Image (cartoon, helix red, strand yellow):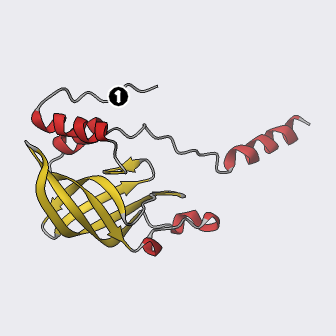
């Protein structure tokens, strides 16, 4: 009886008992992450367009086959941040990296207003989105835009407290 219980327990524990745990997205925390990175970032507020059919979809029956990175051609039409706010016209082709963590994949919506933190590389700009958010915020509030601009100006850039 005890042996059967032990085997049942091992079987139950060997299955996927994982849950994705993410910190709540926060523009101040993301700003600090970009500012602390070795790579250069630019903050842009604008309309993101791409082919949504290219977003990754996890195969729950074969989760290990889900690629960690899916690079999608995209375009952003908006304004980059300056000391005066979002004032510098910015219309460029970029690459959207929709990342997956196991069976959890980043979501994104085309033809949507985004606050983005674009990593500048030799081949252009990269927007990385993860199942936990990443470097893009869809439909940002005025408060979020003001907060990130304050961070850029050197004002208080404290992230919201975790609950």
**Residue 38 in view in this figure:** yes
In the picture, measured across the screen, residue 160 lies left or right of residue 57, that is: left
Q: Position of residue 80 (x, y in %)?
A: 15, 54
Q: Residue at x 64, y 45 (%)?
A: 17
Q: Give coordinates of residue 131: x percent, y percent.
A: 45, 52
Q: Which residue shows up at 26% across the image and 58% down it?
A: 46
Q: Quadrant of residue 47?
A: bottom left
- Camera-side residue of 140 and 126: 140
Q: Residue at x 45, y 69 (%)?
A: 55
Which is more toward the observer, 40 or 156? 156
Which is nearer the eye, 10 or 130?
Answer: 130
Q: Quadrant of the N terminus?
A: top right
Position of 61 compared to 108: left or right?
right
Name the residue located 33 percent from the left edge and 57 percent from the top edge. Answer: 113
Task: Please identify the quarter of the rendering in which residue 9 is found.
Answer: top right
On the image, the x and y values in percent for residue 78 come to 21, 60
Question: In this figure, which residue is indicated by the disc labeled 1?
Answer: 160
Residue 140: image location, x then y, percent: 34, 46
Element class at badge 1: loop
Q: Is residue 40 visible?
A: no
How many dots with numbers? 1
The residue carrying pointer 1 sits among few (fewer than 14), some (14 to 19) or many (20 or more) residues within 10 Å by Cα, namely few
Farthest residue toward the left?
83
């Amino acid at each position: 009886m005890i042996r059967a219980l032990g085997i049942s327990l091992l079987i139950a524990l060997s299955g996927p008992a994982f849950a994705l745990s993410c910190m709540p997205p926060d523009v101040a925390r993301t700003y600090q992450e970009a500012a602390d990175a070795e790579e250069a970032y630019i903050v842009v507020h604008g309309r993101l367009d791409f082919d949504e059919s290219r977003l990754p979809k996890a195969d729950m029956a074969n989760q290990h086959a889900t690629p960690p990175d899916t690079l999608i051609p995209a375009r952003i039409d908006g304004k980059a941040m300056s000391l005066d706010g979002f004032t510098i016209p910015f219309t460029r082709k970029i690459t959207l990296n929709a990342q997956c963590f196991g069976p959890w994949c980043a979501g994104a919506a085309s033809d949507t207003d985004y606050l983005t933190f674009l990593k500048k590389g030799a081949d252009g700009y990269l927007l990385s989105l993860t199942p936990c958010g990443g470097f893009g915020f869809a439909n940002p509030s005025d408060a979020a835009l003001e907060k990130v601009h304050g961070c850029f100006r050197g004002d208080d850039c404290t992230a919201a407290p975790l609950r």
